Image (cartoon, rainbow, N blue to C red):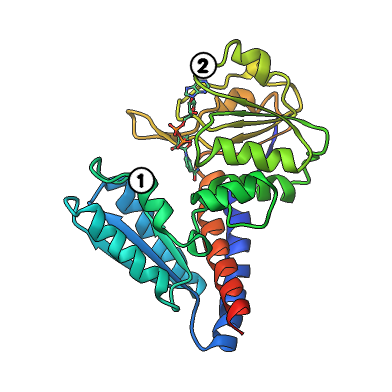
Amino acid sequence: MPAQLIDGKSLAETLRQQVGSRAARFLSLHGRAPGLTVILVGSNPASEVYVRHKVAACEKAGIASQLIRLDATCSSEALLEQIGRLNKDRTVDGILVQLPLPKHIAEKTIIQAIAPGKDVDGFHPVNAGALFTGQPCLKPCTPLGVMVMLEHHNTALRGAEAVVVGASNIVGKPLAMMLLQAGATVTLCNSKTQNLEEKTRRADVLVAAVGRPGLISAEMVKPGAVVIDVGINRLESGQLVGDVDFDRVARVAKAITPVPGGVGPMTIAMLLQNTLDAAESFASLST
Ligand code: NAD
C-alpha cells in the first residue's frame, strides 16, 4: 500500500492563519504589530529567495517585517552595531541574520550578539543550551516544524526508535534533542557513520537531513516507518528533490513527506510562530 502523504504545505497554511489571528490580537492589545527584522549581508541568490519568502509570509500574517541589507564587504563591527541597536528596539521582537554570512564574518560571534529572547532562529547558545536541558526556549524552525508535523500526524514517539541522518547544529542535533525529549530512543548519524543502512532500518521514524539526493533508498527503510525528508537538492534538470528516493520509499513507508511541499513550508510557519512567541513573551514581561 502506498504511504500516506504528510502534507506540510496545507498544515503550514493552517498554522500561518493561526499566527495571523494571534498577531491581530497582539496588535489590538499592544497597539503595534509584532515585529521581525531580517538582516541580509550580501546578495547570495538562494538567501535572496529565502529572505523574500520570509518577509512576504510576515506581511501576510500581520507581522511587521523589516529587511536590512548590508553590503557583502561590511565589517563584523557594522553588523554587530545593527544587532545591538535592534536588541534595544522595543518594536523589534525577532531578529534573524540570514546565513551563510560572507567568510570574513564569524557566524558564531554574530549569533551570540543577538538577544536570546529575540533569537527567532533558535541558534543562540543560550537557546541551544535551554533546549538541551529541556527548558522553555526559542527552538530552531526546521526541527520544530518536523516535530509539529509528527505531532499533527499522531506519530507515536514515546518508546519509538527515531533515526536522524545528518547532525548539523541547525537541523540534526536540535531535532535529535526534541525527539529524545518526546520519549523516542534516538540515533544521530553523520558522515562518519558506519553501516548507515543498519541504523536506518531500525527506525520507526526516519529523518533525512543531509543534502544528498537519493541517499535514503527503499532498502534502508523499515516497512511501516514514518519518513521525513528535510533535504533540499536542486538537480541539473532543475528539479527540486529531497534526500529520500521518494517514489520507491513511498511503497515501503507508512507515511512520508514530499519535497517540495513537506518540511520547507513548515520552517517558515515556525519562524512566524517563534516571532509571535517572542513578542508575547516580551509583552508579558513589560506589563
Ligand atoms: P549541513 O551540511 O550543515 O549538515 C549535513 C550533515 O549531514 C552533517 O552532519 C554531515 O555529517 C551529515 N552527512 C553528510 N553526508 C552524510 C552521509 N553520507 N551519511 C550520513 N550523514 C551525512 O546541512 P544542513 O544545513 O543540516 O542541511 C541539510 C539538508 O537540509 C540540506 O539539503 C538543506 O538544504 C536542507 N535544509 C532544509 C530546510 C528546510 O526548511 N526544508 C532547512 C534547513 C536545511
- Where 259 sits versus 34, above or below? above
Q: Earlier in the sequence, mark 2 or mark 1?
A: 1
User: Which percent across, then down, holds residue 198?
Assistant: 67, 13
Q: Please name whichever residue, 188 or 157, is drawn nearer the observer in this view of the structure.
A: 188
Question: In the image, 144: left or right of 160?
Answer: left
Q: Please name whichever residue, 107 or 243, is drawn nearer the observer in this view of the structure.
A: 107
Q: Residues within 10 Å of mark 2 (few under 14, many from 20)?
A: few
State whether label 2 is within 8 Å of ligand 1: yes
User: Splitting the image into 4 quarters, where does residue 262 fall?
Assistant: top right
**Residue 90 visible somewhere in the drawing:** yes
Taking the view exactly as shown, the residue that stands out farthest to the left is: 73
- The type of residue carrying mark 1 is Glu
Compute the Cα span from label 2 to label 1.
Answer: 25 Å
- The type of residue carrying mark 2 is Lys
Specify the quadrant that holds the N terminus: top right
Q: Residues within 10 Å of mark 1 (few under 14, many from 20)?
A: some
Name which residue lies at 25% across and 40% down: 103
Q: Please name whichever residue, 258 or 47, is drawn nearer the observer in this view of the structure.
A: 47
Give the number of marks.
Answer: 2
User: Splitting the image into 4 quarters, where does residue 222 fall?
Assistant: top right
Name which residue lies at 54% across and 84% down: 27
User: Which percent across, then down, holds residue 224?
Assistant: 76, 27
- Tell me the residue that label 2 is attached to: 192
Specify the quadrant that holds the C terminus: bottom right
Taking the view exactly as shown, the residue that stands out farthest to the right is: 159
- Tell me the residue that label 1 is attached to: 107
Q: Marks 1 and 2: in contact by CB < 8 Å?
A: no
Question: In the image, 201: left or right of 247?
Answer: right
**Residue 99 visible somewhere in the drawing:** no
Question: In the image, 2: left or right of 84?
Answer: right
User: Splitting the image into 4 quarters, where does residue 219 fall?
Assistant: top right
